[in-house]
Amino acid sequence: MEGVTLSGKFVRLEPLDRGHLDGLVAAAAVDPTLYRWSLIPQGKAETSRYIDTALAGRDAGTALPFATIRIADGAIIGSTRFFDIERWAWPRDHARYGLPDPDVCEIGYTWLTRSAIRTAANTEAKLLMLTHAFEAWQMLCVCLHTDARNQRSRAAIERIGGKPDGILRAHRMGADFTPRDSVRFSILAAEWPDVKRRLGELLNRF
């Protein structure tokens, strides 16, 4: 997929490339204990493979990965991506037939370094990505999954307006290399105005 830079007041989401390698290595190494529920690469070799996998998804048209940059100092503070990007096979007489943009996707692979936790970074990144999904791509639905054991992540997704759809059992490999149950959340296009307002209110606290 064609890369796009999403810029806000606090963070900038740059299309991920191999030039971000050293910054991501440094960001992830600050406090690996943060990533109990997420498979976050540690070290140069793992991070290089992480980037290669993300770029393979981009080249296949199923993902759009970003490096998260803190605008105040230009530091790389983490990563996030659109993935499982789908284009549905609409019939020829449907209004969405032939549209160039995708219909649904997931936001995930999101992680931040220690200094960016409990700052505006995650809230603004979600605002930037959801705005792009619903207003540029005109998506029908964006979903997010988290490990069912990750109470902090579940609360954070609900706080921004994600609606729980249920639990997918043994959905993905967990960070502890066991089959993890995932809680699925979604945001529909019709819900986006309220979610956008809520994100704006959360950002105003910063």
Image (spheres, rainbow, N blue to C red):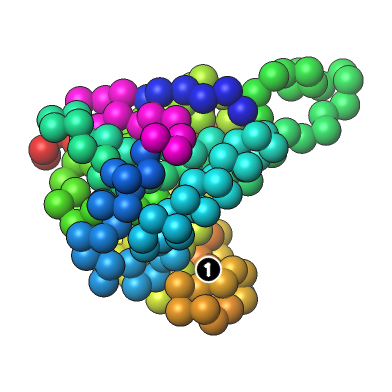
Q: Position of residue 80 (x, y in %)?
A: 41, 44
Q: Position of residue 72 (x, y in %)?
A: 13, 30
Q: Position of residue 159 (x, y in %)?
A: 30, 52
**Picture quadrant of residue 64:** top right
Residue at position x 59%, y 69% in the image: 172
Residue at position x 45%, y 72% in the image: 175
Q: Amino acid at mark 1?
A: Ser
Horizontally, is 41 left or right of 95 in the view?
left
Horizontally, is 136 left or right of 84 in the view?
left
Q: Nearer the viewer, residue 180 or 148?
A: 180
Q: Quadrant of the N terminus?
A: top right
Q: Which residues are magenta?
A: 7-19
Among all residues in the image, which is located at the extreme front? 45
Label 1's element? strand
Q: Nearer the viewer, residue 185 or 74?
A: 74
Residue at position x 47%, y 23% in the image: 4
Is residue 17 shown in magenta? yes
Q: Which residue is mark 1?
A: 182
Q: Is 157 rendered above or below residue 121?
A: below
Residue at position x 11%, y 38% in the image: 206
Q: Nearer the viewer, residue 161 or 128?
A: 128
**Picture quadrant of residue 88:** top right
